[in-house]
Image: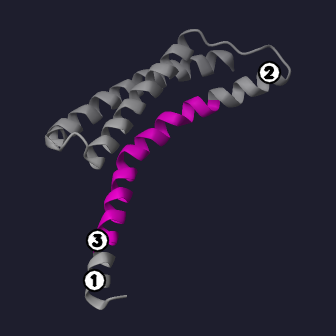
Amino acid sequence: MERFLGRAHRWLGIATIAVFLITGVVLRRHHLNLLALDSGLRLLFRSRHVYLLFSGLLNLAIGLRFALPPAGRGAVVALVGSILMLTSPFLLAAAFVLEAAAFSGVLGYSLGIWSLRSRTGV
């Protein structure tokens, strides 16, 4: 189990760093660097981008020296922590795509409701 989890952390770390590089290309190609520095959308994408790098580096570092306690409560806690670290890159990659969609959706809805309310007085 320990050997498997160590390999999983290493390979997932490398894969996540590759995804980080791909999201960097996506950011560059969509010209988000041309948005204002205080733009919420720019900050949203940049933060997700950096969190992906952090998650990849963390998994890679853990995978290089992975060890579980032999038994007891510490082993269970370490195993749960390992599994949470292995799921984080997937959640962060999904957030890179879905959070922007949610932000755009809420912004569009808010603007639509605001214009409706200003016309109807409600």
SS category of the residue bearing label 3: helix
* Residue lying furthest front: 121
Query: Which residue is painted at 33% across and 71% down in the image?
Result: 109
Q: Which residues are magenta?
A: 83-111
Counting from the top left corner in percent of width and height, residue 14 is at 41, 21
Q: Is residue 69 above or below residue 25?
A: above
Distance in Å between CA atoms under marks 1 and 2: 59 Å
| Label 1 with label 3: CB-CB less than 8 Å | no
Q: Residues within 10 Å of mark 2 (few under 14, many from 20)?
A: few
* Sequence-wise first label, 1 or 2: 2
Q: Depth-wise, is mark 1 or mark 3 nearer the camera? A: 1
- Which SS does the magenta portion mostly show? helix
Q: Left or right of 82: which side holds 19?
A: left
Q: Nearer the viewer, residue 35 or 100?
A: 35
Counting from the top left corner in percent of width and height, residue 63 is at 55, 15
Which quadrant holds residue 2?
A: top right
Which residue is under mark 1? 118
Q: Depth-wise, is mark 1 or mark 2 nearer the camera? A: 1
Counting from the top left corner in percent of width and height, residue 24 is at 25, 32
Q: How is the image coloured?
A: one colour
Distance in Å between CA atoms under marks 1 and 3: 10 Å
Q: Is residue 103 magenta?
A: yes
Using the image, tell me which numbered label, if any, was put on residue 74: 2
* Sequence-wise first label, 3 or 2: 2
**Which image quadrant: the C terminus?**
bottom left
Amino acid at pointer 1 = Ser
Query: Which residue is painted at 77% across and 14% down in the image?
Result: 69
Q: Is residue 6 magenta?
A: no
Using the image, tell me which numbered label, if any, was put on residue 111: 3
Amino acid at pointer 3 = Leu
Query: Which residue is painted at 44% across and 25% down in the image?
Result: 54
Q: Is residue 84 above or below residue 72?
A: below
